[in-house]
Amino acid sequence: MAGPKTTEKPARGGPVRGSAAQRQQDEQTTQVIAGIRALSRAVLDDTKSEAEQRVALALEAARNLRREAELQAQQIAAETLAEAEMEAAHLRQRRLANARLEAQRVLLTRREELIDEVFTRARERLGELRQAPDYKQVVLALVRDGVAKLGEPPEATVRLSASDAGLLTEADLAALAADWRGRVKLSLGTAAEISGGAVIEAGGGHREYDNSFEHRLAELRAALRAEVYQLLQGAA
């Protein structure tokens, strides 16, 4: 009976060296590994280069964004400053306009105050004039002026204030009418609501010339208002 068949096993740690085929296989393996390493390095180099390019592009984009942001910030600051300056200019103009309006209002107020003072004194003086000895001649002169302003009508009525009743008589009016050599006839009418002077009516009351103290003062007031205003502006 034959004994058990034994087979020699190679030692652990790698293939058995020594055969040409084995050496060729080892060389091929080494070359493959070297090729893999070279390919890996190339891939790594390409990847690194691409990554660097991407980083560079990202940095450039960031720098561009920062520059754009700075430009926008400068533009916004300039626009804000311009708007602020414009608003300040408008505010100054409004304040100046308001100051001018206020000065104008003060001038107008002062003008009216002065005119009121002047006419208050004028009315007082006219009241004193009624007590003067020549007041009758003053009224006759006002009547003559009124008749002339009405165009010397054939007939005219003279109205005096109630306080001047009896100041003129029909004889006084006839003597005055004689100046027109009979072309004008004068007569006394009812009392007028005036403080002094005379109101002359013609054409049956359809035409009238107010030569009262109040009316003469009112006519003077408009002219005096302009004179006082110019005086105040010159003093301002």
Image (tube, rainbow, N blue to C red):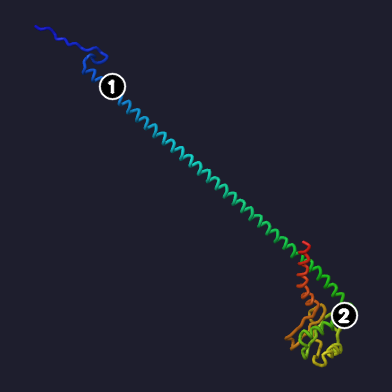
Residue highlighted by disc 2:
135
| Residue type of the residue flagged with mark 1 | Thr
Q: Quadrant of the N terminus?
A: top left
Mark 1 Cα shell of 10 Å, populated few (<14), some (14-19), many (≥20):
few
Task: Give the mark nearest the N terminus, 2 or 1.
Answer: 1
Callout 2 secondary element: helix
For the point 74% across and 86% down, the residue is: 205
Horizontally, residue 65 falls left or right of residue 177, namely: left
In the drawing, does residue 174 fall left or right of residue 26?
A: right
Rendering coords of residue 121 (x, y %) = 83, 70
Which residue is more in the foreground, 194 or 87? 87
**Secondary structure of the residue carrying numbered label 1:** helix
Q: Nearer the viewer, mark 2 or mark 1?
A: 1
The quarter holding residue 100 reads bottom right
Nearer-the-camera pick, 87 or 56: 56
Front position in the image: 194 or 173: 173
- Give me the residue at 23% from left, 20% from top: 25
Residue 203: quadrant of the picture: bottom right
**Vertically, is 111 above or below 156?**
above
Query: Is residue 212 shown above or below 204?
Result: above
Residue count near mark 2 (Cα–Cα under 10 Å), binned few <14, some 14–19, many ≥20: some
**Quarter of the view holding residue 218:** bottom right
Marks 2 and 1, how far apart at CA: 149 Å
> Residue 157's x, y, as percent?
79, 87
Q: Residue furthest bottom?
A: 182
The residue to which callout 1 is attached is 30
Residue 227 x %, y %: 78, 69
| Identity, as a three-letter code, of the amino acid under mark 2 | Tyr
Point out which mark residue 139 bears.
none
